[in-house]
Image (cartoon, rainbow, N blue to C red):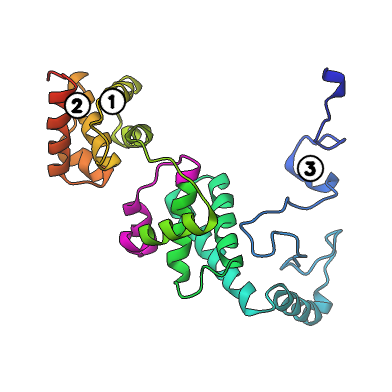
Amino acid sequence: MDEFQIDQGPEWRAFDHEQRDRRARTGAPSTYAISDKGLATIIDWRNVDSNGRSLSENSAQLNRIRILNKRARIANARERNLALALSTLHRYSSKLGIPKTVREDSSWIYRNAAKKQLIRGRSIEGMVATSIYTSCRRCNIPRTLDEISEVSNVSKKQIGKNHRFLCRELGIKLKPTSPADYISRFGSKLGLSGETQAKAVEIINKANEKGLSSGRGPTGVAAAALYIAAVLLGERKTQSEIANVAGVTEVTIRNRYKELSEKVNVVI
């Protein structure tokens, strides 16, 4: 069946970046992360033509064209709001280090919310932070409310309230966050080995079987499981170190640690 497959790539080959740019006949792909989806014409800041020849004698005219082009791209209040929101979303996403796919998805969520006029009466920063949090949940990228709240300066309570509102109005259905989702990220930050992280996931799975993790914060359970696994495998980390990475208190770790060690029959 290989002969029936369609090659989606270009029909030409390029061996370096410059050659690829010269042979390409199309622009960048469309994206939800830009207010005009990347489909508008962009006038370069350099006063040169396509062959690199200087156009400095027409610099005043070119500057005027750039200004008019910028105004045409953002023609009304709705487009200005969207441009500002997506710029804010890009800034938050960069600080959180989330991948491009999540940025696209969070931009799509914000656009849908704006289209249905769900943004009205709410701050742009708050709805952008909520879109990112919702998208992280949808894409299984572990980011806590604390992290998003710290980056956006929007309270956790407000993000949580907006999140429930958006999910209800946009028909977004999400599975509950599992403590195991945070193990890899927390473990990497703490410098723990893959064996220790796997042991922590094993402890969490046993806890889930006995219903110990229901009704408890997933980050607290993940932190306690990592603490137990690190002690068992000789990679000792203090409760304070783990608490700082997980964004929970040492008291929370101690409480979850006692529950897990007693119910899961873990002997330290």
Rendered position, 47 above or below 241: below
Residue to which mark 3 is pinned: 20
What is the total number of numbered labels drawn onto the structure image? Answer: 3
Query: Label 2: which residue?
Result: 228
- The nearer-to-camera label among 1 and 3 is 1
Residues packed near mark 2 inside 10 Å, few (<14), some (14 to 19) or many (20 plus): many
Q: Position of residue 36 (x, y in %)?
A: 69, 64
Tell me which residue sits at (78%, 69%) in the image.
Answer: 47
**Amino acid at dot 1:** Ala
Image depth: mark 3 or mark 2 in front: 2
Q: Are marks 1 and 2 in contact (CB under 8 Å)?
A: yes
Circle 1 sits on which residue?
Answer: 200
**Separation (CA) of disc 1 from disc 3:** 46 Å
**Crowding at label 3, few (<14), some or many (≥20) Cα neighbours within 10 Å?**
few
Name which quarter of the figure residue 212 lies in.
Answer: top left
The amino acid beneath tag 3 is Arg
State if disc 2 and disc 3 touch (CB < 8 Å): no
Q: 188 and 222: which one is in front?
A: 222
Instruction: Classify mark 3: helix, strand or loop.
Output: helix
- Extent of the magenta region: 137-158
Alpha-carbon span between mark 3 and mark 2: 52 Å
Question: Residue 27: percent from the left, percent from the top?
Answer: 78, 53
- Marks 1/3 in contact by CB < 8 Å: the verdict is no
Q: CA distance from mark 1 to mark 2?
A: 7 Å
Residue for point 31% across, 53% down: 146
- Amino acid bearing label 2: Ile
Residue at image x 76%, y 81%? 64
Give the vertical position of 234 relative to 104 (above or below). above
**In terms of secondary structure, where does tag 1 sit?**
helix
